[in-house]
Structures are given as C-alpha cells and as structure tokens.
Image (tube, helix red, strand yellow):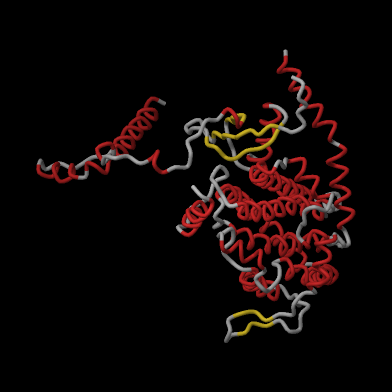
Amino acid sequence: MEEKQTEYSIFEVFIQRTQAEHHVHVGSLVAPSPDVAIQTARENFLRREKAVNIWVVPRDQITATPYEPDFFTREMDRKYREVAGYTENGRLWRMFKEKAITLEEIVAYVEGRKARERKKQA
Amino acid sequence: MTEDVRYARFMERIERGEKIEATDWMPDEYRHLLIKLIHMHAVSEIMGAYPEKEWVPKAPTLRRKLAIMAKVQDEMGHGQLLLRVAEDLAAPLGKTREDLVEDVYKSRVKFHNVFHMEAKTWADAGVIGWLVDGAAIINQAALLETSYAPYARVLKRICAEESFHMQHGENIILALAMGTEEQKQMLQDALNYWWESLLFFFGPKEVTPAAERMLHYRIRTKTNEELRQKFLDKYVPRIWSIGLTIPDPHLRYDEEKKEWVYTEPDWEKFGRIVRYNEGPKSKERMELRRTAHEGQRWVREAMIRSRMATAAV
C-alpha cells in the first residue's frame, strides 16, 4: 500500500435511541478509524439526547437505491396489504351485532391484564 | 440527454418543491452557490465559537461557565455537520476537509462580520448569545425550506440546539437587566457596540445578483431585507422592554408601510472587515485557528498511519 492517505474517511452514523427501536441514520462524519468515528459520533450527535447504541459504517460499504420514484412505485393496488384495505369489516361486524376491533385495542388489553396480574402476584 | 434538457428537468423539480440530494445531477452554478453558502455557514459556526470561548475562563459563576462551554461545543459540532455537507458538494471539484478548513486562515472563505468583533465584557458575551444568535436563528429558520436536502436535514438538528442557545443568551441578559446600575450600563454599552453589526449581518438591502440566483434555485426563499425586518419585529420590542435604548434615533415602525425604518449600517466599513479580515479580532482568531489546525496535523497523520498499519497486518 504505497499510496499515502492524508484525509480521514467518511462514516455514516446510525443511532439506536432505545432497545425497542431500530438504528436510525442521523448523518455522517470524518474520522481516521472506526473507534474514533464512534467517539466523534457521540460528541456530534448525542450531546443531549439519550441512546443505547451507535453504528458507524464506512460510506463506501453502503449500497443504496437511486432517488428514482420508478423503483418505489407499484403497478397494483396494494390496499390488500394494509389496514385501510379492510374498512368494510366495521360494517360487516355490525350485521352480526358486534364491533370491529383493532390490534391497538388488543395490545392495550393484553398489557393492561399483564400489569394487573403482576400487581396481584406481588 | 443534452445539458439544456437536464437543466430544464432540474428546474422543474425545483419548481415542484422537490428536494435535491448530493448524488443527483445538478447545474454547476447550483453546486457553486451551495458550496459558497454552506462553507461560509460552517466556518462562521467555528469562528463564532471564538468570541464566546474567550469568556469560558472568565464566566461569572460555575453554572455560567458550564453553560457557555456547552454552547461553544455546540457551535463546533454545528461546524462539523455543515463541513460534511460542504465536503460532499465540493468532492467532485477535488476539495477535501483539509482544504475547507485551511481556507479560513488562508483568507479564501469569508465568515460573518459579527465574529470579527470584540467581546470585551460579560454583557458582550450575553448580547452575542441573545441578539447575534437571535439573528442567526432567523437566518437558519428561513433556510429550513432550502431546496438542498442534506443542508435542510442538518439545519433541522442545528435549529433544535439553537433553542437552548436562545434561552441561554436571554438568561444572561435578563440577569444583567435586573442587576446594578453598573451592570445595566454594561448591557447598554454592549448593545451600542453590537447594533450596527447586527443590522449588517443580514447583508445588503438590495437583492444582489448572487442572492437572486439563490432565490431562483430556492436555495433560499427570503431576501436579506425580509429577514432583517423579521429580526426587528421580534427583537426591538423586547430590547425596549428591558429598558435599553437602541442607538439609532431614526428607528421607528412605519405603520403604513408595515415595516421598520432604520439608519443603515456602514456597509463600506463592515464590508471591508469581512472581505479583508480587518475587524478588531479577525487576525488574532484566524491565527488561533491556524495554530490549532497546523499544530495538530501530526496527530491526524499519526492516527491515519496507525489505522493503515493495523489494516496491513
């Protein structure tokens, strides 16, 4: 390796705010090595905010799509994949004298019951 | 695709309000305007930390010392984020971080007039935090709508931190405004010293050819005068409310025209300060920047060498 490198390398920075979330890209920085990049990332992006994890990735290791809408458009109606595609359920349930129920309601119900059970056990 | 067609497509995107990314095709003029603007912004963040840094050892209490130190660190951080944006734009022209930093002390890039001025007293430090930052916030808030996406993203983070700077500056000012006669006088003297610089900060009243091009590309969407008027709207009433006198006997609000009338700053004098680095502190701060950068060159080189040595094993 004869070529003399005089510039730092570019690293992209990803921050994980809590363990319940994925890492999110927040920006980039220059550093001589991955460990210095980690230190600089903490100083540049986490002076106030809390986080549980940082990734630094050399920019040349990232493969990205171009900014072209074509890649992201779909020919077919994809409502069948989404909640919004099933709005008729509410009307159908009413025919059976029942109410439609959402995932959020179930999650809240499940978490509430668990919380009560834990309290009872304690 | 011919150059004309590319340009037309690009302008259609701009006019539709689309954001441009670093990897997109862009006209050379757009790239050069962005580099000039963002490079100056980055360098001004760094040089802007100097007048406040000078007050770190002299801050009146430990809490004030910690707070002003945090602010200095923020400004340096903002400089780094902005340099990254400028670097990606300048990379096709063969320019790197080293070049962009050297440009400061080799007088190849300008920085804001206010950071050439002297912070003699603690009230000066307070006025910098309150009004200089206030003016900068108005400028940056207006740039959040910029057509260049990487700049917009970084500005979003910067503006979030500026909200702390705003409160920090106001707190220093309010303490002095409620203090002894001597402190009040110190505050008035500071306002007298900074007022003209603050008006100049927003740039010439007329829309210069370069500014016109920036509006054309929606790099910025408001003129200097619009922003200066917004600054006066927000700050003049507050300056008056704490019993200060603005050193301009002609300053008044024209109810009919719905605008502030003010004595124009000495464009010639401040123009020279920015162009030729002739301000009271220009040379000293640039020299400090030079020693910091040159003096640490061996550290940067050693770190790169050590990385390459490990990679070779």
Q: Is residue B5 visible?
A: yes
Q: Residue at x 24, y 42 (%)?
A: A85
**Between residues B64 and B265, which one lies in front from this camera angle?**
B265
In the image, is A53 to the left or to the right of B17?
right
Q: Is residue B178 visible?
A: no
**In this picture, is A86 found above or below B201?**
above
Q: Residue at x 64, y 46 (%)?
A: B89
Name the image quarter holding residue B246.
bottom right
Figure disc tally: 0
Q: Position of residue B168 (x, y in %)?
A: 70, 56
Q: Position of residue A6 (x, y in %)?
A: 77, 31
**In this picture, is B200 found above or below B129?**
below
Name the image quarter holding residue B302.
top right
In the image, is B164 to the left or to the right of B296?
left
**Between residues B49 and B202, which one lies in front from this camera angle?**
B202
Q: Residue at x 74, y 19 (%)?
A: A1
In the image, is A8 to the left or to the right of B282?
left
Q: Position of residue A103 (x, y in %)?
A: 29, 37
